[in-house]
């Protein structure tokens, strides 16, 4: 098995394990009106990041033409969460183990997307900026708005 498949399977496994861990942390409220409060939807932020990791890893495994975009989107989202938390813009609900694992995976995915060591479709400047903007939007959606 080549290096690309080994890395993608490892990222897929991490994405699945974190998704399960984050799903188990979601508290489902009693009553109908509680489902329309921001606190309920904020719980899904860590799950959204781990699903982004899963999708990016799957694209990486099958050599999809949008692999580098998905890797960059996940990388920016995963790295922006602890950064914006440290800057004091919001209080992230991603647990410490999740921040550490997602940050390591985020750095790896950013490097894979921009260095393109496996010869996938290169990122254009516009697509790289778009992935950063979408990463910011995901973070602000689940943590600020």
Image (cartoon, rainbow, N blue to C red):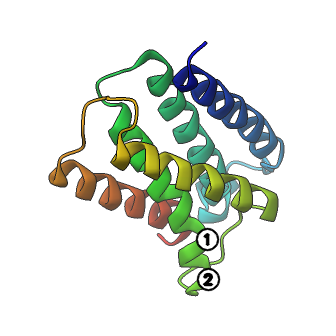
Q: Circle 1 — which element?
A: helix
Nearest the eye: 30 or 144: 144
Give the residue at the far top of this rendering: 1
Q: Are the residues flagged by discs 2 and 1 in contact, CB closer than 8 Å?
A: yes
Give the residue at the far bottom of this rendering: 88
Q: Is residue 49 above or below residue 86?
A: above
Q: Is residue 133 above or below residue 49?
A: below
Q: Position of residue 96 (x, y in %)?
A: 79, 65
Q: Residue at x 69, y 48 (%)?
A: 32
Left or right of 97 on screen, residue 36: left
Q: Which quadrant, please, contains the N terminus?
A: top right
Residue 60 visible in the displayed image? yes
Q: Position of residue 85 (x, y in %)?
A: 61, 78
Q: Residue at x 43, y 42 (%)?
A: 71
Nearest the eye: 30 or 128: 128
**Quarter assignment of residue 8:** top right
Q: Circle 2 — which element?
A: helix
Q: Is residue 61 above or below residue 45?
A: above
Q: Position of residue 17 (x, y in %)?
A: 77, 35
Left or right of 97 on screen, residue 109: left
Disc 2 residue crowd, few under 14, some 14–19, many 20+, Cα 10 Å: few
Q: Is residue 23 above or below residue 82?
A: above
Residue hosting label 2: 86
- Distance, label 2 to label 1, CA atoms, is 6 Å
Mark number displayed over residue 82: 1
Residue 33 visible in the displayed image? no
Left or right of 26 on screen, residue 53: left
Q: Position of residue 86 (x, y in %)?
A: 61, 83
Q: Residue at x 26, y 53 (%)?
A: 128
């Amino acid at each position: 098995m080549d290096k690309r498949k080994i890395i993608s399977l490892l990222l897929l496994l991490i994405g699945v394990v974190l998704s399960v861990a984050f799903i188990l942390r979601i508290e489902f409220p009693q009553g109908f009106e509680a489902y329309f409060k921001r606190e309920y939807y904020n719980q899904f932020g860590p799950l959204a990041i781990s699903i982004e990791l899963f999708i990016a890893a799957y694209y990486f495994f099958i050599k999809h033409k949008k692999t580098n975009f998905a890797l960059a989107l996940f990388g920016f989202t995963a790295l922006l969460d602890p950064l914006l938390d440290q800057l004091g813009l919001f209080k992230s609900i991603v647990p410490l183990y999740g921040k550490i694992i997602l940050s390591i995976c985020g750095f790896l995915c950013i490097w894979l997307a921009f260095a393109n060591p496996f010869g996938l479709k290169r990122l254009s400047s516009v697509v790289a900026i778009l992935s950063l903007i979408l990463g910011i939007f995901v973070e602000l959606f689940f943590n600020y708005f």
